[in-house]
Image (cartoon, rainbow, N blue to C red):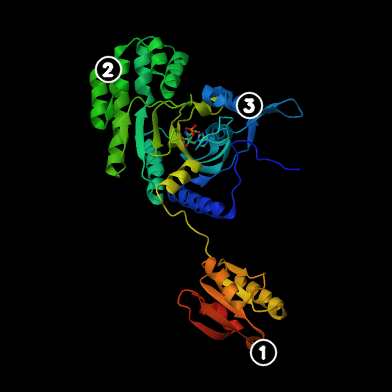
Amino acid sequence: MKFERPRGTRDFLPDEMMSRKSVESRITGVFDSFGYQQVLTPVFEHTELFHAKSGQEISQHMYVFDDKGGRSLCLRPEATASIARMLASGLKTMPKPVKVYYSCPMYRYEEPQKGRYREFWQAGVELVGMDSHESDAEVVLIASECLRTLGVEHKLRVSDLRVLKHVLAASGLKESEQDSVIHLLDKGDIEGVKAKVRDESFFKIIGLKGGLDAVEAVEKIVGEKIKTITSGFKGILALLDSVGVAYTVDFSMARGLDYYTGMVFDVKVDGLGAQDQVCGGGRYDRLIGLFGGPDTPAVGFAFGFDRVLESMHLQGIDLGRSSVDVYVIAVDDNVGDKAFEISSMLRRSLGGRVVVHGLARKKLSKALEVASNMSASYAVIVGSKELEDGSVILKDMSSGSQEKLAIADIASRIK
Ligand code: HAM
């Protein structure tokens, strides 16, 4: 019998897994450095959770199934709704803000293509319980710091959905109609938007791009009333400027999820093709209340982890390699058991360093080639002659120098 992988899924072989692990730990290392703490929610949830406010884009692309009890469940397509559900019940007693992060697979039944999978990974943060320009700026800064740490060239766009919603509301559109205009805009369907929106100022605003000047242009177009919104947004931009985060204000940016209520941002990388968005996020102040919790403001983002890796490949960035500290070679079968014992002793005394016991018996020159291919720093050569007086040969693989040593002294000689 031969089986194929389900469409849109991938297997990860050791080399690739090593790169993924190394990049993931650098991203989560940045999350840790901002004081965020890791959480994990179930892989499957009640389907309703995502129908409530995640938007049609997500709802239409879920893996939905009935369990044996007849409940409709789905594989999580994203984590924000799950985290809002989780916090809705426990928030009252938690000191705020709550700062959490996750790094785990998501599932969307989309048409697979380059950079778009049915099983893909997201690494994201949620800052819950705080509504301020500082918290918005902190979240954008975290995303930017991750990409800076990884060395990924990117373009960050930022907007505030309240600007568009304000103009749409002023022209008489109800909230659900506003959401559908935002969806059309997200899909780039300008004709669709034109069919629903008559107000010329809306089209002027979505054409605005730049820095502070774009925000000031909005204030001129809409007038005084918008300043309660734009003053907070300008506060975010000023903070981003103060910490050197480069961005473009782009009011045409809409996000495909319905729960956003304020600042939104995304990050794109040139050369990725159609699926060039590596990160997306924003403020969602009503989701936790909607899930039965106290009304709680929140803001967050998620990286499309697979797309971050693809960007790194594309930009020729080193993804990290596996490293072996010590490779232990038994020169023949007679000393195999002793070499096994020495490997175990070294692993314990070198705590955490990588010690590989060479299981396949090879000629010494071939075994040293294996050690070198693994980029081992040292080879320990176990031979019957040296063992007679309790010694082995320690070879420094980078300099090529070697010395005879008592077994008990090997660990202290390894740098
Ligand atoms: P999202 O924009 O739907 O936002 O997804 C975030 C990122 O996940 C995207 O920018 C993209 O890089 C990646 N992504 C989405 N779908 C796929 C796919 N099929 N294959 C590969 N990568 C994909 C959210 O999910 C929100 N929960 C983000 C958020 C957190 N907002 C506030 N907090």
Cα–Cα span, label 1 and label 3: 68 Å
Residue 31 left/right relative to 105: left
Marks 2/1 in contact by CB < 8 Å: the verdict is no
- Crowding at mark 3 (Cα within 10 Å: few <14, some 14-19, many 20+): many
Question: 132 or 82: which is nearer to us?
Answer: 82
Q: Residue at x 71, y 77 (%)?
A: 333
Q: Secondary structure at mark 2?
A: helix
Residue 137 rendering spot, x and y as whole percentages? 36, 38
What is the spatial separation of the Cα atoms under label 2 and label 1, in whole angstroms? 90 Å
Q: Is residue 113 left or right of residue 172?
A: right
Relative height, residue 185 to residue 143 (above, below): above
x then y, percent, for residue 232: 32, 30
- Residue position marked by numbered label 3 in the rendering: 47
Q: Which mark is residue 388?
A: 1
Please tell me which of labels 3 and 2 falls first in the chain: 3
Q: Where, quadrant-wise, is the N terminus in this rendering?
A: top right
Mark 2 lies on residue: 222
Name the quadrant containing residue 84. top right
The kind of secondary structure element at disc 3 is loop
Q: Looking at the picture, how far across and down is residue 167, in whole percent?
A: 34, 16
